[in-house]
Amino acid sequence: MPCIRSAQTNSVPVPELSKSKRKKPADYGLYLVTDRDLSLGRSHHEVVAAAVKGGVSCVQLREKELDTRDLIEEARHLKQLLEHYGVPLIINDRVDVALAAGADGVHLGQKDMLLADARRLLGDGALIGISAECAEDAVRAEKEGADYIAISPVYASATKTDTAPPLGLSGIGAVRKLVRLPLIGIGGINDANIADVVAAGADGIAVISAIVAAPSPEEAARLLRRRMGRA
Ligand code: TZP
Ligand code: MG
């Protein structure tokens, strides 16, 4: 029986592997995290292209289900698109995928690869973000050399429910006093509350549903930008 397989070669140009020591400056202001299930049948490429036109300044590819080779291919497609706009691409969880796809960095949770190991593999030029659910997580991430901290959940979110209790605005304010790294709020943030989260001390705002599930991701991103006062 012959076995039928999908493409065994790369269909997207493969970038040179480089472990640059120079970190490119990143703008985490409006940070989009992808979610295939919430994208109303649209591709990541379509959603991300529109969102960037609307003002998204950083993109994280978050895919929990895709096979590794499909994930690398997806990442390369997005990298090609985002390179054009000068917007960094961060890969959720997967240091190997970030390396293979020539992405700008990774985003790691408290149970993912240790920051020091990721740094050793990716080099000083990579952007490494850490998820923090409390002040201790945030302070440790800063001490260990993270590039930014995503603090969550700010509010309860239907997109991710296996989280710590929401920190609220007072929680953001408390963590803000303890770390100097860029602090990105995530969880339940939308155009109605984004300004409050910024006022509480967040340098950037990360969203999933407010952009990917919107009828127009471009308009949604533009409105979020306007509301955060950084159009
Ligand atoms: N991490 C903490 S909350 C969350 C993640 C990935 C989900 C955020 O999604 P939404 O739709 O912006 O609330
Ligand atoms: Mg993770």
Image (cartoon, rainbow, N blue to C red):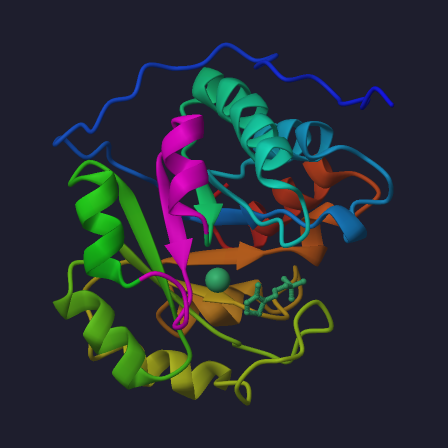
Report the front residue among 126 and 122.
Answer: 122
Inspect the magenta stretch and tell me whether residue 111 lies in it: yes
Which residue is located at x 40 percent, y 34 percent? 88
Report the front residue among 103 and 3.
Answer: 3
Can you say which quadrant of the picture contains the N terminus? top right
Q: Is residue 19 above or below residue 222?
A: above
- Give the image quarter of residue 111: bottom left
Residue 125 lies, in percent from the top left, at 19, 36
Inspect the magenta stretch and tell me whether residue 187 lies in it: no
Figure quarter occupied by ligand 1: bottom right
Residue 57 lies, in percent from the top left, at 46, 38
Residue 41 lies, in percent from the top left, at 86, 39
Which residue is located at x 65 percent, y 59 percent? 191
Report the front residue among 55 and 141.
Answer: 141
* Residue with the most extreme front position: 1
**60 displayed left or right of 38:** left
Q: How many labels does the image show?
A: 0
| Residue 182 visible in the snapshot | yes
Residue 102 lies, in percent from the top left, at 38, 26
Which residue is located at x 20 percent, y 75 percent? 140
**26 displayed left or right of 131:** left
Which residue is located at x 35 percent, y 70 percent? 201
| Residue 146 visible in the snapshot | no
Report the front residue among 222 and 18.
Answer: 18
Q: In this view, does 14 lie above or below 171?
A: above
Magenta extent: 94-113
Q: In this view, does 213 lie above or below 185?
A: above
